[in-house]
Image (tube, grey):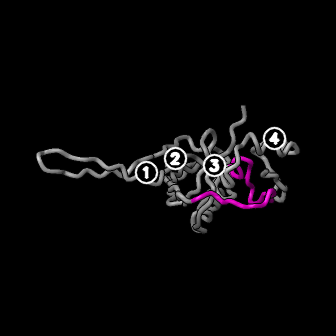
Amino acid sequence: MKLIPMRFSGFEWHHNPREISFECDKKVNEFIVPKNTAEVQDSGRKNMIVRGVGELYGEDCLDQFASLLALFKKGGTGVLSIENFEPIFAVFESVKLIGAPRENILTYSFVFREVMEEKERRKTALYTAQNGENLWDISYKFGVVIDELVRLNPQIKRPDVVPDGEVIRLA
């Protein structure tokens, strides 16, 4: 089985991180009322935080880290796609080199913070893939069920590989 690489804003990891955690919290307020009772108010969920730790392998591991650092410095929001999870809009919050580099191996950690905003809604039925997007990214971006995108685009044999410039039918 081939694992689908983690992706963010056109960047694709050579090797998926070995650890990933998803922190999902809600804003909950407790109000003390007379007679020693309390009321609890659910004010909605907070932005999810995605943390991970992994290794960059190979003679080009320093170049891989430099690319990851450049992506971090670029800033802005993008679609974060992780295998078996629904993609999210996120901001690359931090990246860290951990410990002393070993020959052809760098250990790093990262943090992404979800940006809870509406998915793009366009009235057009077509979209041109860009920046190494895959069908899962496009599915999330436009709120179209992945099975529907696969059905509408039989020319795409693998949903995880969409050539830049490929015209995707959305409806």
Q: Residues within 10 Å of mark 3 (few under 14, many from 20)?
A: many
Q: Residue at x 58, y 44 (%)?
A: 17
Instruction: Give the mark toward the camera: 2 or 3.
Output: 3
Write the residue at 51% across / 47% down.
52
The residue tagged 2 is: 53
Q: Amino acid at mark 4?
A: Arg
Q: Name the residue at the top extreme.
A: 1
**What residue would you read off at disc 4?**
151
Q: Callout 3: helix, strand or loop?
A: strand
> Which quadrant of the view contains residue 123?
bottom right
Q: Earlier in the sequence, mark 1 or mark 4?
A: 1
Residue most extreme to the right? 155
Report the side of 6 relative to 151 (left or right).
left
Locate the N terminus by quadrant.
top right
Can you tell which mark lies on residue 72? none
Which amino acid, by three-letter code, is at mark 3?
Ser
Residue with the mark numbered 1 = 45
Judge by depth and name the residue closer to the eye, 146 or 12.
146
Q: CA distance from mark 3 to mark 1?
A: 21 Å
* First in residue order: circle 4 vs circle 3: 3
Q: Earlier in the sequence, mark 1 or mark 2?
A: 1
Toward the viewer: 98 or 26? 26
Specify few, some or many for label 4: CA neighbours under 10 Å numbering under 14, 14-19, or 20 or more: few
Element marked by disc 2? strand
Q: Main secondary structure of the magenta part?
A: loop
| Residue 14 on the magenta segment | no
**Residue 171 is at least partly visible in this image:** yes
Region rendered in magenta: 118-139
Q: Residue furthest left?
A: 35
